[in-house]
Image: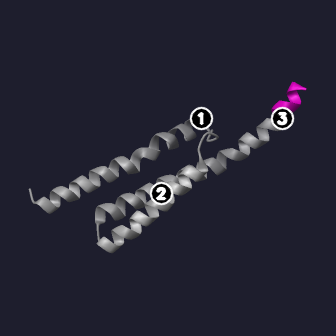
Amino acid sequence: MDEALAWTLVGFTAGFFTSVGAIPQIWKGIKTKKMDDLSVPMVVLYSCGAALWFVYGLYLKSWPMIIVNIIFIIGQMVLVYLKMKYRHKEEVSEPITDAVKQ
């Protein structure tokens, strides 16, 4: 195997594991319809880092770096979307629960 191809495969493999890291959280959020434990600052910081890695990948013309960071950013965007989607339900349900308890 060509050495450049081997390193490209290493890059894609590392990126694959990084990119799919959000899938369990996305799946849990969809299943439970709760995202209250998701840290938005963490998602924002990860997304900023991934955006910078993406730009760096463009500079280097590194397809593994470009592709996996696009996938990673999409995953983070889905997390933020789910957080916003399910936040309304959580905020609406709390006053009703409080009123019933009284």
Q: Amino acid at mark 2?
A: Ile
Query: Tag count in the figure?
Result: 3
Q: Circle 1: is it few (<14), some (14-19), or many (20+) Cα within 10 Å?
A: few
Which element carries disc 3, helix, strand or loop?
helix
- The x and y percentages for residue 4 are 15, 62
- Nearest to N terminus: mark 1 or mark 3: 1
Dot label at residue 74 = 2
- Nearest to N terminus: mark 1 or mark 2: 1
Give how far apart the Cα atoms at labels 1 and 3 are: 20 Å
State which quarter of the image contains the C terminus: top right
**Residue 8 magenta-drawn?**
no
Give how far apart the Cα atoms at labels 1 and 2 are: 21 Å
Q: Circle 3: is it few (<14), some (14-19), or many (20+) Cα within 10 Å?
A: few
Which element carries disc 2, helix, strand or loop?
helix
Q: Amino acid at mark 3?
A: Ile
The quarter of the displayed image where residue 5 is located: bottom left
- Report whether 69 appears left or right of 81: left
- Report whether 22 appears left or right of 79: left
Q: Up-down: is 74 above or below 57?
A: above
Residues at circles 1 and 2 in contact by the CB criterion of under 8 Å: no
Residue position marked by numbered label 3 in the rendering: 96
- The x and y percentages for residue 71 are 41, 57
Magenta-drawn stretch, dominant element (helix, strand or loop):
helix
Q: Circle 2: is it few (<14), some (14-19), or many (20+) Cα within 10 Å?
A: some
Which element carries disc 1, helix, strand or loop?
helix
* Residue 77 visible in the snapshot: no
Q: Which residue is at a point 22% across and 59% down the rendered structure image?
A: 8
Q: Which residues are magenta?
A: 97-102
* Residue 10 visible in the snapshot: yes
- Nearest to N terminus: mark 3 or mark 2: 2
Residue position marked by numbered label 1 in the rendering: 32
